[in-house]
Image (cartoon, rainbow, N blue to C red):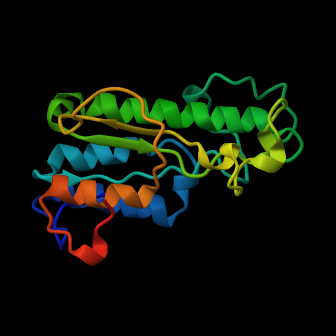
Amino acid sequence: VQPLGRAAVARDAAHVQAQALVRVAVRDRDHRLPGFGHLPQLFLQSAHEPWFCYLAFNAGHVPFHAPPAHLHTQDLASAGPPDVDPRPYYKAATGAVDAEIGRLLDGIAPLLPRTDVFFAGDNGTPFVVVLPPFDALKAKTTLYEGGVRVPLIASGPAVAQAGACDALVCMTDLYATVADLAGAVVGSEDDSR
Protein backbone atom coordinates (compact mmCIF):
# COMPACT_ATOMS: atom_id res chain seq x y z
CA VAL A 1 0.00 0.00 0.00
CA GLN A 2 1.45 3.34 -0.94
CA PRO A 3 0.18 6.77 -1.85
CA LEU A 4 0.39 7.91 -5.45
CA GLY A 5 3.54 9.66 -6.46
CA ARG A 6 7.20 8.89 -6.75
CA ALA A 7 7.87 8.83 -3.02
CA ALA A 8 5.77 7.65 -0.12
CA VAL A 9 5.65 10.55 2.28
CA ALA A 10 4.44 9.87 5.80
CA ARG A 11 2.43 12.82 7.02
CA ASP A 12 1.51 11.63 10.49
CA ALA A 13 2.15 8.84 12.99
CA ALA A 14 -0.94 6.79 12.09
CA HIS A 15 0.09 6.81 8.44
CA VAL A 16 3.60 5.61 9.33
CA GLN A 17 2.19 2.91 11.61
CA ALA A 18 -0.18 1.61 8.91
CA GLN A 19 2.61 1.50 6.34
CA ALA A 20 4.85 -0.36 8.78
CA LEU A 21 2.10 -2.89 9.52
CA VAL A 22 1.63 -3.60 5.84
CA ARG A 23 5.38 -4.04 5.32
CA VAL A 24 5.57 -6.41 8.32
CA ALA A 25 2.57 -8.44 7.11
CA VAL A 26 4.18 -8.94 3.72
CA ARG A 27 7.70 -9.51 5.02
CA ASP A 28 6.53 -12.07 7.59
CA ARG A 29 4.60 -13.97 4.92
CA ASP A 30 1.27 -13.28 6.67
CA HIS A 31 0.09 -12.50 3.15
CA ARG A 32 -0.30 -16.24 2.61
CA LEU A 33 -3.22 -16.11 5.03
CA PRO A 34 -6.31 -13.99 4.76
CA GLY A 35 -6.81 -11.75 7.76
CA PHE A 36 -4.74 -8.70 6.90
CA GLY A 37 -7.44 -7.05 4.78
CA HIS A 38 -7.85 -4.49 7.57
CA LEU A 39 -4.35 -3.08 7.06
CA PRO A 40 -5.25 -1.04 3.97
CA GLN A 41 -8.13 0.42 5.97
CA LEU A 42 -5.62 1.66 8.57
CA PHE A 43 -3.61 3.24 5.78
CA LEU A 44 -6.62 4.79 4.06
CA GLN A 45 -7.90 6.35 7.28
CA SER A 46 -4.80 8.52 7.37
CA ALA A 47 -3.85 8.73 3.68
CA HIS A 48 -4.05 12.01 1.88
CA GLU A 49 -5.73 11.95 -1.51
CA PRO A 50 -5.01 10.92 -4.11
CA TRP A 51 -3.90 7.45 -3.04
CA PHE A 52 -3.34 4.05 -4.57
CA CYS A 53 -3.85 0.76 -2.76
CA TYR A 54 -2.66 -2.54 -4.21
CA LEU A 55 -3.59 -5.60 -2.19
CA ALA A 56 -2.58 -9.08 -3.35
CA PHE A 57 -3.82 -12.14 -1.52
CA ASN A 58 -1.90 -15.37 -1.96
CA ALA A 59 -4.74 -17.51 -0.59
CA GLY A 60 -5.94 -20.05 -3.12
CA HIS A 61 -2.40 -21.08 -4.01
CA VAL A 62 -0.45 -24.10 -2.85
CA PRO A 63 0.38 -25.04 -0.21
CA PHE A 64 -3.28 -25.07 0.82
CA HIS A 65 -4.11 -24.45 4.45
CA ALA A 66 -7.10 -23.76 6.71
CA PRO A 67 -7.84 -20.03 6.82
CA PRO A 68 -9.38 -18.55 9.99
CA ALA A 69 -12.80 -20.19 10.49
CA HIS A 70 -14.68 -16.88 10.74
CA LEU A 71 -13.70 -16.04 7.15
CA HIS A 72 -15.30 -19.00 5.36
CA THR A 73 -18.17 -21.50 5.53
CA GLN A 74 -16.39 -24.73 4.57
CA ASP A 75 -16.50 -27.75 6.90
CA LEU A 76 -12.80 -28.50 7.18
CA ALA A 77 -13.25 -30.75 10.23
CA SER A 78 -14.48 -33.58 8.00
CA ALA A 79 -11.94 -32.89 5.24
CA GLY A 80 -8.73 -34.81 4.94
CA PRO A 81 -5.34 -33.08 5.11
CA PRO A 82 -4.83 -30.39 2.45
CA ASP A 83 -2.29 -32.47 0.53
CA VAL A 84 -4.78 -35.37 0.30
CA ASP A 85 -8.07 -33.45 -0.04
CA PRO A 86 -7.19 -29.94 -1.29
CA ARG A 87 -10.58 -28.87 -2.71
CA PRO A 88 -12.26 -27.93 0.61
CA TYR A 89 -9.20 -25.88 1.56
CA TYR A 90 -9.18 -24.14 -1.81
CA LYS A 91 -12.88 -23.31 -1.43
CA ALA A 92 -12.24 -22.06 2.12
CA ALA A 93 -9.39 -19.86 0.88
CA THR A 94 -11.58 -18.44 -1.88
CA GLY A 95 -14.33 -17.73 0.65
CA ALA A 96 -11.83 -16.10 2.98
CA VAL A 97 -10.54 -13.78 0.24
CA ASP A 98 -14.15 -12.87 -0.56
CA ALA A 99 -14.76 -12.05 3.12
CA GLU A 100 -11.62 -9.91 3.32
CA ILE A 101 -12.45 -8.01 0.12
CA GLY A 102 -15.93 -7.39 1.55
CA ARG A 103 -14.44 -6.15 4.79
CA LEU A 104 -12.08 -3.83 2.93
CA LEU A 105 -14.88 -2.37 0.80
CA ASP A 106 -17.13 -1.98 3.85
CA GLY A 107 -14.29 -0.19 5.62
CA ILE A 108 -13.88 2.36 2.83
CA ALA A 109 -17.62 2.68 2.06
CA PRO A 110 -17.63 6.49 2.45
CA LEU A 111 -14.84 6.72 -0.16
CA LEU A 112 -16.41 4.36 -2.72
CA PRO A 113 -18.45 7.00 -4.62
CA ARG A 114 -15.14 8.59 -5.67
CA THR A 115 -12.98 5.47 -5.76
CA ASP A 116 -12.22 3.22 -8.71
CA VAL A 117 -11.78 -0.42 -7.72
CA PHE A 118 -10.27 -3.18 -9.86
CA PHE A 119 -10.48 -6.81 -8.82
CA ALA A 120 -8.75 -9.54 -10.79
CA GLY A 121 -7.85 -13.19 -10.49
CA ASP A 122 -4.45 -14.26 -11.65
CA ASN A 123 -4.31 -17.43 -13.71
CA GLY A 124 -7.09 -19.95 -13.39
CA THR A 125 -7.97 -22.83 -11.10
CA PRO A 126 -5.19 -25.08 -9.75
CA PHE A 127 -5.38 -28.48 -11.46
CA VAL A 128 -5.50 -30.37 -8.13
CA VAL A 129 -8.95 -28.92 -7.31
CA VAL A 130 -10.57 -29.23 -10.75
CA LEU A 131 -13.53 -31.62 -10.92
CA PRO A 132 -15.30 -33.20 -13.91
CA PRO A 133 -16.71 -32.23 -16.32
CA PHE A 134 -13.69 -29.91 -16.42
CA ASP A 135 -10.26 -31.21 -17.39
CA ALA A 136 -7.45 -30.72 -14.86
CA LEU A 137 -4.97 -30.76 -17.75
CA LYS A 138 -6.65 -27.63 -19.11
CA ALA A 139 -6.54 -25.57 -15.91
CA LYS A 140 -4.03 -23.20 -14.31
CA THR A 141 -0.70 -22.78 -16.15
CA THR A 142 -2.29 -23.64 -19.49
CA LEU A 143 -3.64 -21.49 -22.30
CA TYR A 144 -6.93 -23.37 -22.22
CA GLU A 145 -10.13 -21.73 -20.94
CA GLY A 146 -9.59 -23.01 -17.38
CA GLY A 147 -6.18 -21.37 -17.24
CA VAL A 148 -6.93 -17.99 -18.73
CA ARG A 149 -10.57 -17.14 -17.99
CA VAL A 150 -10.32 -15.34 -14.66
CA PRO A 151 -12.38 -12.56 -13.10
CA LEU A 152 -11.72 -8.92 -13.86
CA ILE A 153 -14.14 -6.51 -12.26
CA ALA A 154 -13.99 -2.73 -12.50
CA SER A 155 -16.22 -0.44 -10.48
CA GLY A 156 -16.28 3.27 -9.78
CA PRO A 157 -16.91 6.68 -11.27
CA ALA A 158 -14.52 6.10 -14.20
CA VAL A 159 -16.51 3.10 -15.42
CA ALA A 160 -18.38 4.51 -18.42
CA GLN A 161 -20.84 1.67 -18.96
CA ALA A 162 -21.95 -1.23 -16.77
CA GLY A 163 -22.03 -4.68 -18.27
CA ALA A 164 -20.03 -7.74 -19.20
CA CYS A 165 -17.35 -8.01 -21.85
CA ASP A 166 -15.79 -11.05 -23.50
CA ALA A 167 -12.70 -9.19 -24.72
CA LEU A 168 -9.30 -10.72 -24.17
CA VAL A 169 -7.56 -8.71 -21.44
CA CYS A 170 -4.18 -9.03 -19.76
CA MET A 171 -3.32 -7.44 -16.41
CA THR A 172 -0.73 -5.25 -18.12
CA ASP A 173 -3.64 -3.68 -20.02
CA LEU A 174 -4.66 -1.97 -16.79
CA TYR A 175 -1.39 -0.04 -16.47
CA ALA A 176 -2.35 2.86 -18.75
CA THR A 177 -5.85 3.04 -17.27
CA VAL A 178 -4.62 3.22 -13.69
CA ALA A 179 -1.88 5.69 -14.63
CA ASP A 180 -4.46 7.87 -16.39
CA LEU A 181 -6.74 7.78 -13.33
CA ALA A 182 -3.76 8.82 -11.21
CA GLY A 183 -2.99 11.73 -13.52
CA ALA A 184 0.37 10.24 -14.47
CA VAL A 185 1.86 10.82 -17.89
CA VAL A 186 2.48 7.55 -19.69
CA GLY A 187 5.17 7.46 -22.34
CA SER A 188 4.66 5.52 -25.56
CA GLU A 189 7.05 2.80 -24.38
CA ASP A 190 4.81 2.24 -21.30
CA ASP A 191 1.45 2.57 -23.03
CA SER A 192 -0.66 -0.56 -22.50
CA ARG A 193 -3.69 0.69 -24.41
Residue 148 image position (x, y, % from top left): 61, 49
Residue 112 image position (x, y, % from top left): 21, 32
Is 173 left, or right, of 139 in this rendering?
Answer: left
Q: Is residue 91 visible?
A: yes
Q: Is residue 10 above or below residue 80?
A: below
| Quarter that holds the N terminus | bottom left
Outermost residue toward the front in this view: 167
Residue 143 image position (x, y, % from top left): 68, 55
Image quadrant of residue 161?
A: top left
Residue 175 image position (x, y, % from top left): 32, 60
> How many numbered marks are there?
0
165 and 64: which one is in front? 165
Q: Is residue 82 visible?
A: no
Which residue lies at the image location 55% right of the left edge and 61% below the top edge?
29
| Quarter that holds the C terminus | bottom left
Which residue lies at the image location 85% right of the left edge and 47% below the top edge?
83
Is 31 left, or right, of 184 in this rendering?
Answer: right
Q: Is residue 187 above or below residue 149?
A: below
